Amino acid sequence: MKTSTSSGLLTQAFNTETFQQQGHQLVDMLSTYFAQVQEGTEISPFKHYHPDKLVDFWQKKLEQKPTEDLSTFFEEVIHQNIHTPHPQYMGHQVAATLPVNALADFLGAALNSGLGVYEMGSPIVAMERVVIKNLAKVLGYTEQADGVLTSGGTLGNLTALLTARHLKLPGDSWKEGTSASQKPALMVSEAAHYCVDRAAKVMGWGEEGIIKIPVDAQYCMRHDLLPQYLAEAKAQGKIVIAVVGNACSTSTGSYDNLEAIADFCETNDLWMHVDGAHGASVAFSDKYRPLIKGIERADSIVLDFHKMLLTSALTTALVYKNGNDAYRTFAQQASYLWADDQETEWHNLGKRTFECTKVAMSLRIFMIWQTYGSAIFGEHVTYLYDLGHLFGEILEESKDFEMPISPQSNIVCFRYVPDVSLSTEQLNQLNRHIRQSIIEEGDFYIVQTLLNGKVYLRVTLMSPFSTEKHLMALLEKVKKVANQTLNLPMDSQF
């Protein structure tokens, strides 16, 4: 059988001289970009584009004649994208990644290892083992701990809760399914991330399988109510298998009392899972580590490196106190991947994750850790949490703003409250308008949240280049937009 005749396009596409030129060009552009975005003067954190217009823009690009000159392409992607390292980016929980991380992704993409199977990327699989074991020590676990890296906190939380189901629910739900007579459930703060609800529903438990525990005035789980809610669940025929603690909540950055939750779980033989996607990173900070006191007693912990730890998305660690538990989540035959389906082989990662093919997450973390040591993680977390506390102090001293709670982390919620009589809905509309106006102008990027029926502006301080000066500038911007809206004189004094 003859192969098809090649036009030479594949040979051209793999030309190493062209690759070298394009690569140098991109690195030079990104070096300039990093310098500009850190300074924050020549570039804005965000540009507001209508989604349909961007689709039209890129459709026209695709219809143009192919070219190996990628300079314009690089420039347009950088120009249109959001800029997370910018000191006035204060929006979603996405890290300002280190330049060395970009090199790790460059290397990982070039090698394109599968990683679900040891043979497909042995050094990177070995790095994952080293990263997980060292992270486990930082979290306070013993050598018995183990885990994996996976694609995001949502998948990490689901995997952990599947493990809890397998170990705490009678029968073998993996092989036999969940019996109609069973009513499995988990207990979680009403302030928990929506992915915990999704996990319960993905497992087929429905709304009845999610027991929401009320929060206190600080938006922390009312752990004192756990016995009452457990008794009520049992009376309804539910089988509670787990409690999920927040470290910290997404909306307000509040930390649940993990020691109290651990006491309750141990007393009642329940699985304790900690959603530490954002806030478990304080394990690297001597100053803020007390916020997660008791986390080492959890059966499983999720931590996102791509939130507070300077790493690109998606890079999530799922760590188990008992490393053998990681192998009990999934159990299915795949003889073409490994010889023994039942053997607990740490190096065949596909036995413990949803992914069979994984990107080189460990390469990113390992390169940062090896280059700068774990101290860089602690320095970054401490700085941003300090900045969050400083912002809280500034807001408390201002008569024009109010906060639902004093910040515990780098997540700060506040709203503008003018010295005029406005209803709750009018205040909500005003603060929504403030946020929309700010992002349309593009000088700052912030988000909003709804707490007890009130709209708050919400900032998550993610850039290591943000300072008090930028916080004050944001508040000036908020007041300016609000006063223009209300047609009030501008008073810049706090």
Image (tube, grey):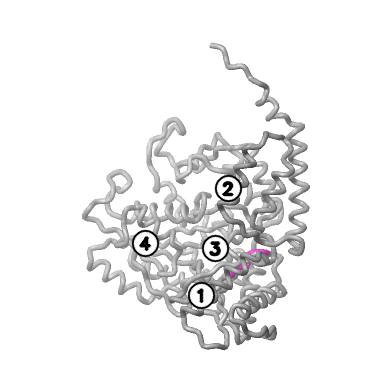
Q: CA distance from mark 4 to mark 3?
A: 21 Å
Question: Which of the image's four quarters has the C terminus?
Answer: bottom right
Q: CA distance from mark 1 to mark 2?
A: 30 Å
Looking at the rendered structure, the kind of residue marked 2 is Val
Circle 1 packing at 10 Å, graded few (<14), some (14-19), many (20+), is few
> What label sits on residue 242 in the rendered view?
4
Instruction: Check disc 2 and report the residue beneath it.
Output: 55
Looking at the rendered structure, the kind of residue marked 1 is Gln
Residues in magenta, as a range: 459-463
Q: CA distance from mark 3 to mark 2?
A: 32 Å
Q: CA distance from mark 4 to mark 1?
A: 39 Å
- Where disc 3 sits, the SS reads loop
Label 3 or label 1, whichever lies nearer to me, is 1
- Where disc 1 sits, the SS reads helix
Q: Say whether disc 4 or disc 1 marks the residue closer to the N-terminus.
A: 4
Q: Say whether disc 1 or disc 2 marks the residue closer to the N-terminus.
A: 2
Q: Say whether disc 3 or disc 1 marks the residue closer to the N-terminus.
A: 3
Front in this rendered view, residue 198 or 108: 198
Instruction: Check disc 1 and report the residue beneath it.
Output: 429
Q: Residue at x 74, y 56 (%)?
A: 34
Looking at the rendered structure, the kind of residue marked 3 is His
Q: Residue at x 47, y 62 (%)?
A: 275
Would residue 168 be seen by someone viewing this image from the given angle?
A: yes
Front in this rendered view, residue 427 or 372: 427
Front in this rendered view, residue 146 or 112: 112
Q: Residue furthest top?
A: 1
Label 4 or label 3, whichever lies nearer to me, is 3
Instruction: Check disc 3 and report the residue beneath it.
Output: 278
Would residue 290 be seen by someone viewing this image from the given angle?
A: no
